[in-house]
Image: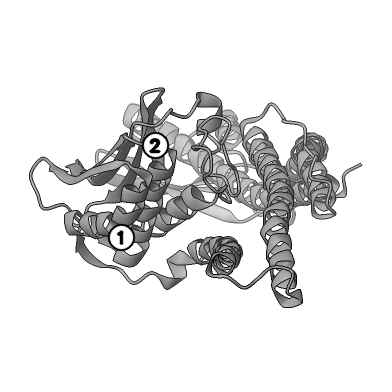
Amino acid sequence: MDRLGVRLALAIGGAVAVVIVVAGILVNILVGSRFSQYLAQEQTARRDQAAALLADAYRFNGSLALTPLEVRQLATAAGGPVAIYDASGHLVARSAGLGAALGGPVESTPIVVGGQTVGRLAVQSRGLAAAVVRTASDAFRRAIDQTLLIAGLVAVSVSVGVALFMGLRMTRPLSAMAAAAHRLGSGDLATRVPVPTDREGHELATAFNSMAESLQRSEQLRRQAASDLAHEIATPVTVLTTQLDALADGVVPATADQLAATRETAGEVARLVGDLHDLAAAEGASLLRAPERVDLLPLAADAVAAVQALYQQEGVALLGPALIGAGPVRAEIDPRQVGRALQNLLTNAALYTPAGGTVRLSVAQEGPLARIRVADTGPGIPPEHQARVFERFYRADPARARRPGQPGGTGIGLTVARELARANGGDVRIEASSPQGTTFVIELPVAG
């Protein structure tokens, strides 16, 4: 049984018990006080009613004189022995028992006729009746206490049962998720948790499984990337070592061609190391960001100038940058980072566009976003690869084959571009792709 659920149920049951005890004490005090007030008001009402009867008799007879039978009836109506006095204070009549030792206090009420006090009625509460009333009051309070106790026990039992059921229902997924997290942390990246039907549990389990899938995919990419990088680095390093050994041993003469080939091989190794450095720098770009208000059209022109030699070498025409709509288009960005992201997109477009093809660069403001589009006339990216081209070390070369003789890349150019754009509050995405070409777009928030 889940300990967290049991503790939660006991805590709720204890809280309910405390509330019921406090409520019982308050109810006992309030009900007892109101009951005593009710008894006092009842006695006063009976006395006032007896005085009203005497007032009616005075209006009818012109005096307060009563027969012994009428006096006894009046005492019964008043709730105790009575004495009747005239306006001068002289005793007119009294019932038996008035002043008895067991009697209670004597209360008097004026007898008013036509706005004038014609006498006074004194009533003594019966001592035995008062004791009976106190006994009834105590019994009533005990009945209330017993009722509250029974209701409290039932409420606590039901509350603990419901809380235990709900607590276990709520905490079992958490316990399962905690166990899954331990397995995930131990390296079992295939760990997943069942998805509950309730909304909160469903969202939590879905988020956990999504995280686990992301970690598993990242680990697969890391292993694949490590294998690819080891293979790619091993080849030029082996070639470079062989060339240097041959040159050192005199097997191959140190001609200009041999030295150029050796330098090209060393450059290939340096390029691979540089790509890894670029990826590490892009992942920390938000910490190194130095934003300023930038006009994106000149920034795009600088990126074009930086890659112009590559386009001439590849035989691809680079058109732009063209401003679409009214300008200027400004954004609060780090120009060095966004410029590097744009250069990566332009480089990617040049390498995957056939010779004689065209790449168009444009800048536009569309609502709150500034968009820099890079549209090429390459072979396009099939839908099954589009969702993954921004993943680290992922290369969709089978989908977008580069021309023969071109060196293989590490597959991080687009990853670096997206990381740099996101560090500046924007993003990079594929806007459109078909066999006639692909359009990448950098989206950035417009400066206010």
Left/right of residue 250 with respect to residue 406 in the rendered view: right
Quadrant holding the C terminus: bottom left
In front: 154, or 71? 154
Q: Position of residue 414 (x, y in %)?
A: 47, 48
Residue at image location 77% in from the left, 39% down from the top: 173
Quadrant holding the N terminus: top right
Q: Position of residue 197 (x, y in %)?
A: 69, 26
What is the residue that sits farthest to the top in this orientation?
435
Any mark on residue 128, and which?
Answer: none
Describe the element under mark 1 as helix, strand or loop. Answer: helix
Any mark on residue 306, and which?
Answer: 1
Within 10 Å of disc 2 (Cα), the crowding (few <14, some 14-19, many 20+) is many
Q: Position of residue 426 (x, y in %)?
A: 36, 51
Q: Position of residue 398 (x, y in %)?
A: 58, 31
Left/right of residue 123 with respect to residue 380 in the rendered view: right
Describe the element under mark 2 as helix, strand or loop. Answer: loop
Residue type at tag 2: Thr
Residue at image location 39% in from the left, 36% down from the top: 353
Left/right of residue 374 with respect to residue 157 in the rendered view: left
- Between marks 1 and 2, how big is the CA–CA gap? 18 Å
In front: 294, or 129? 294
Any mark on residue 353, and which?
Answer: 2
In front: 158, or 205? 205
Residue at image location 82% in from the left, 42% down from the top: 176
Q: Is any part of residue 146 visible from this angle?
A: no
Left/right of residue 309 with respect to residue 23 in the rendered view: left
Pick whichever of labels 1 and 2 is earlier in the sequence. 1
Q: Is residue 59 above or below residue 82?
A: above
How many numbered marks have been drawn onto this rendered protein structure?
Answer: 2
